[in-house]
Image (spheres, rainbow, N blue to C red):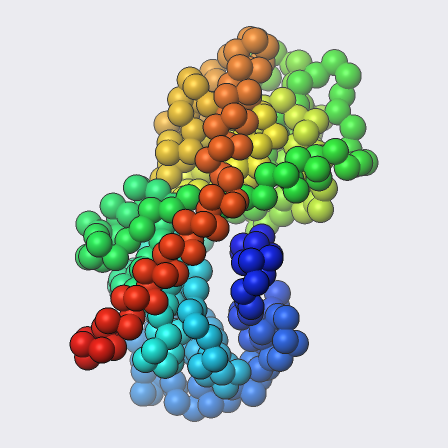
Amino acid sequence: MVQLREKLEAKGHQVDMLGYDEDNKSVYIVNENRKVDRDKIQPLLDAKLNARAYPAIHANNLVKSTEFNRYVYELSAAYLGIDKYDIIHAHDVISAASLNRIRPDHIPLVATLHGSVAHEIRHQLTTIHKTKTSFIARAYFDEIERIGATSAEITIVANEWLKNILVDEFKVPEEQIKVLQYGFDTERFIKAMKSKTSIRRPIDKKVIIYTGRLVELKGVHHLLSALNELKKIRNDWVCWIIGSGDQQADLELQCKSMDLDDDVLFFGKRDDVPSILEKADIYVLPSLLENQPLSVIEAQIAGKAIIVSDAGGLPEMVENGVTGLVFPTGDVAALCKNLDLLLENEKYRNMLGKNAKKWGMSYWNIDKGVKNLMEVYKDAISKRKRDVENGTS
């Protein structure tokens, strides 16, 4: 979003960014340094959305926290004011649903959805959020997905996978959806790859790398299991894990139990990912559910051999055997086999990396992405104007 803002501003447009701060304590307009503190709104919500009046909200903690966050955001946005804008661009179903409720009639809304919240929640309701009231949460997030995805004049998705989910499951009109790839500042990333990092690659080993959040949905536990099998075959590798998350301690314990302490290194959250990635040989993303991750885009621009699961939109990013390797989600044996293949065959590994970079440099071109987005904005403005004139908004 920051890259998009910079490109739009370079074209002479004024762009404001509205959202929560890192601690979810305030909603603020970043560049104007104006904010609304959560504790100013929370008492009102506590009084209005109490358990007696709305028992269903309080029956499930995940629903309760999401619903309260939604209303804090909505009321804060209304207080800060959104009536001066020519267009509003939301980046998730919750903000789209909220902003749609408070926007003036004349302002068009575009929503870019970076994944299926409902599908992620469905998975989590069988793991980290499993409770006796999980059925309430599933129904709630299904409805939020439907409302948010249909709130805008145009809903942008990154791939056919997400488009099909929205059309088939959540009954979003197909004509409302625009499949549009992300733009990415490739030149900036390539420059950042040349900067220094304190991490040094081993002289006699290849480097396997994962970059991203350490959460259950990313499937890093499957990568560790595959590495456990790989170690029985060969030891000419190390694995770098870059990122942080609530699964880090469990993953470190998994490594210890598999005697991988010297083979897998956890570096935590880093600001020098491009330069670290430059030193790696193989990038792996074993996600259980995925849309269009930035980490794969970065690996492509870095020209790395890539291995991904076939979850979600990943097969639309990586062509198996051409720009990388794709394995069945959760198939540890297949992942191990692919790692062994790329470690063994340097020529094939380099070919995949070169193909990935060539494809990525063209497909993720940010100027092309911004140009396409500007066309979407124009279409949304025209559609909103027609709807207002016809009384159908």
Q: Quadrant of residue 295?
A: top right
Q: Identify the residue at horizontal 63%, vertical 22% (top origin).
A: 281
Q: Nearer the viewer, residue 13 or 296?
A: 13
State left or right for residue 35 relative to residue 52: right
Viewer-side residue, 213 vs 146: 146
Q: Residue at x 45, y 50 (%)?
A: 371
Q: Position of residue 33 (x, y in %)?
A: 65, 76
- Report the residue at 63% width, 47% height from top: 244
Quadrant assignment for the C terminus:
bottom left
Q: Is residue 230 above or below residue 239?
A: above
Across and down, in percent, residue 272 comes to 72, 42
Q: Residue at x 25, y 77 (%)?
A: 388
Residue 123 or 155: which is nearer the viewer? 155
> Is residue 9 among the parts visible in the rendering?
yes
Q: State the quadrant of the N terminus.
A: bottom right
Using the rendered image of the protein, determine whether residue 268 is visible from the camera's viewpoint: no
Q: In the figure, 159 relative to 41: above or below?
A: above
Q: Give the number of marks.
A: 0
> Which quadrant would residue 98 be assigned to in this image?
bottom left
- Give residue 228's position: percent from left, percent from top: 56, 23
Give coordinates of residue 162: x percent, y percent: 32, 47
Position of 131 with respect to 20 (left or right) is left
Residue 55 is left or right of residue 15, and the answer is: left
